[in-house]
Structure formats: structure tokens, C-alpha cells
Image: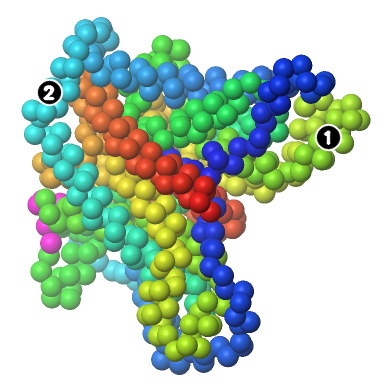
Amino acid sequence: MAITAPRALAPTRVDADRSPAPPTRRRRSKVGLVVRIVLAAVTAVVMAFPLWIMLTTAFSGQQTFDATVSVVPREFSLDNFSRVLDAWPVGLWFGNSVVITVITTVLTVVVSVLAGYAFAKLVFPAKNVLFLVMLATMMIPTQAILVPQFRIVNGLGLIGTFWAVIIPGAAATFGIFLARQFMLAIPNELMEAAKLDGAGSLRIFWSIVLPLCKPLLAVLTLLALMYQWNDFLWPLIALKDPDLYTLPIGLQFLQGQYQTDYGALMAMTLIAVAPLVVLFLAFQRFFVQGLATTGIR
Amino acid sequence: MTAVSALPATSSPAGGGSRRRRPRWDRSAIAFLAPALVLSIGFLIIPMVAAFVYSTAKIAPLSGKITWLGLENYATMFDDPVFYRSLLNTALFMVITVPLSMAVGLALAVLMNSVLPGRKVVRTIIYLPLVISGVAVGLIGTFLFNETIGVFNGLATSLGLPNASWQSSGIPAFASLVLITLWIRVGFTMIIYLAGLQAVPQELYESASVEGASGWQSFRFITFPLLGPSTFFLLIMNVIYSFQVFDTVFVLTNGGPGVATEVLGTYAYKTAFGPARDQGYGAAIGVVIFFLTLIFTIVQWRTNRNRDETA
């Protein structure tokens, strides 16, 4: 994971208030608009092209391609899907991905929100030092800790189970950071009032802080989901048994089996990609907000 | 980093015995912090320390028996042509993809920030590759760039253009990596720049246009300078990403042909978990990736802190 950094985006110190902003908005030329539309259209076509190819190939029903590639779909068929689903336990892999992703996401969110609350609102010794240490762990590259992490997880006897992926996966400190930033904005007066009424930390957390944290929970959940659903390097090492594969590992495995059967490969890719794309389209705002504030990927 | 300097002033009055305001602390903090601490100590901090330790060892592939070597793995690195090639490729990858994805991302952000019909749809299309896994991206890439049945060569043939040897020679293979990386990176750059652009006060452009500034001039003298913090942030994030790139390379070229597209990330994995299973040496390469990341992270923290102080 890339390190993450908050952006207090561009505190613009330019003193623009003095000009009372006359409403003489220069009329934008028609030519400029046309140029922009053309540029945007070209961009959209180029950016959508790889996904379009994946879609049309997956639904083409053809085993392999000759050199005459069709950019428009020739016929509609689900043969590629049935071929992949019959030959490989794709359903199982899908289920594995769902189980691992859901458990890891829940753990990540819970752990992050708990720790974020402590860092934002509780008083305890060495708080700043601890928080700095947590921040620093965000920059540790996966490749740097691959070997020791494997040996630790192996030593715990987790290799060969989903926990080998789930537990290290929940050690995602970006969530703690996000949670703390969000909770700092919650006014202390709210908590002090509750404290006077005799509420303990847990009670304040549960009935005052958490209900105010819905946007935070959405962002955290989506980021953790995306990260875990797509995670590859660590599961590649931790999941040896094909019955435990997640979709990215299964995809990579099929690549070796079906060197040129791109119909089947694209069908499988689509299966792996579709859930996140649907989620993204439904919750775009939270995804974008999360990516913009943490810089993941 | 803003966060660090924004820490709340929790320090209690230092004067001993002054009033009843003792530095009482919330015991429940232990419970709130415990899960996070256990996980990050167990799976991040100890592994990081252990990575340094293992990088000075030879770990037997099967038995896992450890023989201490001192700095021998690092000495091996200095004589290892594949390591040099990976380092060079990683640097090249960075030098090519970072400026390109930032320039394209900035251009797209400016475009998307302007009046434009259907802008939401286009924006979504540009973001979309961000949520797709590196493996899926790499796999789509193998189909696009396949030399015999691939899409790009098929298109080239039908347009009467020469085919490129995307898979069998080094430079086209590297180019294929760069292209696919741009596809997934420009969206991220655009997100950050768009956020930056939204913070630029509209009045500035209005007064500039009153004074007769051209579109390019207002971009050059208003937009770009005000985007400075975003640019810096993106620079660091993209550089770090390029040090750590793995999935896409692994699936698209697997470092090949030969070692033409091997990067530090793939080389570290192959050394530790490939056929050689030289985990000690693999850990040492991982340590190099760590230090490269560390240097750029420190630069970012320092710069951000300075900015916070002056702001």
C-alpha cells in the first residue's frame, strides 16, 4: 500500500476578496466548447477502450481470436462464461473472495474506528508518539515485509486458512488515520455533556460518536473493500491451496492455463471486476472522497 | 504531514500539584487501542524489523534453517546484474510514468473542471480503472498487447500499420507497461488535481480576464502556481507507487522478455518466493524498496510540516 497523506488541499492565501468580481464573465467561444467536447470524447473512448474490449470479448463466445479483431461485438453468447465456470471452481473462488473481503473489511473498520476514537478524543500517555508510529507504518511497502510476514503467519499455523490473509489484511493503519481525522471534528462539548451525565468512554463512543460517523464508515468500508478485493501479492503467497484462491489469484492461475483463450480469460476477468465496478458506480462520491484524502493506489 | 502538527494540545499543565487538574488519563484507551496495536506491531512493525534481520541471513529453502551472513546479501546485490537492471527499470518506469500521468491528469482535470456537457460520465470513465485490480488490468493488457492475436496489433494490421513486438522485445514491452500504467494512474492524478482546482477562487480568473489575460496565461500564472501543493503531493505519491509497482508488471510481462521489464517489486518476490526461494536475499531487496520509499516519505513530511508552520 502506498503511504497515505492527508491533504489540507491548497490553502489558497491569495487575497482575492478585494476585487468585487464583476459579473462580466467572458463569453466562452463556441469553438472552445467544441474543442473541449472533442477532447473529452476522445479521452472517454481511449479510457473506456480496454474495458470495452474485455466486455465484448467476454460475451463473444469465441475461444480464441484470429488476427482480425472485432471492436464491435459480433454475436452475443455466454459460452465463455460456461466454459470457465465448468472447468474451474470460479464460484468457489468468488465465494472465497467475498468471505475474505467481508471479514477483513469489518475487522479493518472496527479496529480503525476504535483506535481513531482513542487518538482523537481520549487522554493517555505517549499518545503523540504512538500516533506517529502508527502513521509511520503506513509507508511500509508490502514487498519489504513479505518474508518475515510469511514466517510469522506460518509460525502461527495460519497458512492454509483464510486467516492468513484476513488478519494481516486488517492491519491497515490508513483507516486509523482517517478515523482520527474525522473524529477530531466532533465537538468535545458533546462528550463532556455526556460525561457529566455519567457516561463512560464506551457509552460515549457507541451512542454519541459512532452515530455521527456514518460518512466516515462509508469511506472506510469502501476503501477497505476495494483494497482487499483487489489484493494480490500477499494472498499469492499465503494461499497455496487452489480451493482457497481468491479471484485475483484464480485469474493469475488461469492466465497460465489459457494462454490464448482470451474469450475465457476476459469472461473470468469480468467476473472479478464487476462487483467493484458496480459498487463504484453506486457509491462513487465516497470512493473519490476516500481516494482523494488518503492517496491509496 | 498536516496530521502531525494538528495534534490536539492534550498536554496537561506541567506544574506539579497545581489544582486538581491532574493528568488523569482514560484507562479505557487501552481497550480502544489494543486491537490496532496488536495488529500493527505483529504484522507491520515486527516484520519490518525482522526484514532487516533476515536480510543478513541465508534462509534454507526447505528447512528454513538460518545461517547468518552479515552484509553478504548486500554485497551480492552490488554484483548482481539482474538487481541493477531491476533498479534501472524501476527508475526508468518512474521517470517516464510519473511526469506523463501527472501532465495528462492535470490536463484532464482542467478539462473536467470546465463547462462541458456529459462531464460526469466522462469523469466516471476516467476514474473507473482505479477500482480494477492490478491483476485484471494486467490480464486485459496481455490481450491488448498480444503479438499474434492481440487487439492493438490487429488494429494496426487493419489500418496498414506495422505490428509492434510488444512481448518479444524489450522496448515495446516496456512501452506496453507504461501505457497500461497511464491508463490506471491518470484517474488518481485527476482526482487530486480536481480537488485542488476547486479550491482556486473563481474571482481570480474573472479579474484576469478583465485584464485581458489569455486562457493559457491564466493557467500559467494562476492555476498552476495555486496547484503547487497538489503537484507536490502527487509527485511523491506517484514516485512511491512506481517504487512498489508489482501486480501489473507481474501479470503483463512478468519482467520479460528476459529481464527487460523486471522491477524491484517483481524481483524481490521472485527471489524470495520463486524457484530460487532465497528469502534472505529477497528480504534484502525488500529493504532497498523500503529505503527508497522512506526517503520520499521523509521529504513529504518535512515539506508539509514546513508549509503548515508558514501558513
**Taking B305 as reference, is A279 left or right?**
right
Distance in Å between CA atoms under marks 1 and 2: 60 Å
Q: Which residue is more in the foreground, A274 or B278?
A: B278
Residue at (29, 61) in percent of width and height: B100
Q: Residue B291 in the image: x percent, y percent?
A: 30, 32
From the viewer's perspective, is residue B161 above or below residue B308? below
To which residue does mark 1 refer? A192
What secondary structure is marked by label 1?
A: helix
Residue B83 in magenta?
Answer: no
What secondary structure is marked by label 2?
A: helix
Image quadrant assignment for residue A115? top right
Q: Which residue is more in the foreground, A30 or B300?
A: B300
Q: Main secondary structure of the magenta part?
A: loop
Residue A16 appears anywhere in the view: yes
Q: Number of numbered discs present?
A: 2
- The magenta-colored residue range is B164-169
Residue at (83, 34) in percent of width and height: A192
Q: Which residue is more in the foreground, A156 or A55?
A: A156
Q: Amino acid at mark 2?
A: Thr
Graded by Cα atoms within 10 Å as few (under 14), some (14 to 19) or many (20 or more), the crowding at tag 1 reads few
Farthest right residue in view:
A197
Q: Residue A134 in the image: x percent, y percent?
A: 51, 29
Image quadrant assignment for residue B141? bottom left
Graded by Cα atoms within 10 Å as few (under 14), some (14 to 19) or many (20 or more), the crowding at tag 2 reads few
To which residue does mark 2 refer? B76
Q: Which residue is more in the foreground, A90 or B297?
A: B297
